[in-house]
Amino acid sequence: MIDVNILRSLLASLAVGATAAAVALSPTAAGAAELPSHARIAALGDSITRAAVADGTTASQPQNSWSTGTSTSVNSHLRRMQAAGVTMTAGNYAKGGARSGDLPGQATTAAATGPDYVTILIGGNDVCAASTLSGMTSADTFESNVRRTLDIIKAQNPDARVMLASAPSLMALYQIGRDNVTIRTRWNLIGICEIMLADPMNFSSEANARRSAVEARVDEYNQRLAKLAAERANVFYDNGAVHNTPFTRTDLSILDGFHPSIAGQNKIAAEVWTSALEQGVFTP
């Protein structure tokens, strides 16, 4: 396997003294630094990482993924690394509808390809697939699933860097779309994440309590991700970057008013990348 420490050193050196918005990782900026011939990125997760309906059309658009996307429309993590002059390969193993329990299977497939950098974004379906609050994945089960996933990745390559992206705020999504009749109509027609988005104009104490309970579970998931990152070498948590990203209506797909649009994918890519640089993810 190529020594990815060279890549990490390069990316870290490019980040020194640059603002998050200015980090371009261009081949010119790399100067005469020695570049590895190859490095591999793998993405695990759900429909967000598959860039579902990002441009308002097809369900799966991995080319527009915040992590491994190849489209020039999204400044993905893959493209940011390629801009450093590194020949990258990538695998997007995320799947629409995936829950945390599906991650170990994704990790097994991904680990066989020898990734050096792995991104994981999961949690939305662990609550959205439930029809009742009691049906949501418990925080303990969520943690166990992610822990098993990390074990699989690390068994293949102990030095692989893993970036755990926080689960997005479903309450923030609800608040963005509830006052827009078009978005509300889409939610109702599709029946998407009804445990949070059903009957969006119902402001009764019962409805508000339901939404608060869903968001509280998402917060628990993110707390467990932070815990896992703190326990393990080369595993990093984005410190709530995705969860706290101030999304707007333009960041939501025009098709369902739920999944990130191209603009939303770019925001996720930028927020997680900035967190990665700040934490020295690419530092040997």
Image (spheres, grey):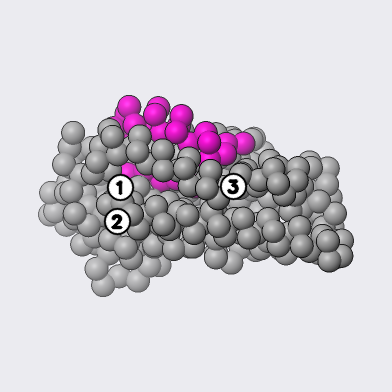
Tag 1 residue: 161
Q: Decide: is 125 above or below 23.
A: above
Question: What's the distance in space between the residues labelled 2 and 1, CA to CA?
Answer: 7 Å
Residue range in magenta is 97-122
Say if residue 146 shows up in the picture.
yes
275 to the left or right of 31:
right
Tag 3 residue: 138
Which percent across, then down, holds residue 205?
84, 66
Q: Amino acid at mark 2?
A: Val
Number of other residues with Cα within 10 Å of mark 2, as a class: few under 14, some 14 to 19, many 20 or more: many
Q: Earlier in the sequence, mark 3 or mark 2?
A: 3
Q: Residue at x 37, y 41 (%)?
A: 150
Q: Secondary structure at mark 1?
A: strand
Q: Earlier in the sequence, mark 2 or mark 1?
A: 1
Q: Is residue 115 magenta?
A: yes
279 to the left or right of 216:
left
| Picture disc at residue 281 | 2
Q: Is residue 10 magenta?
A: no
Instruction: Report how many numbered discs are placed on residues in the image.
Output: 3
For the residues bearing labels 2 and 1, Cβ distance under 8 angstroms: yes
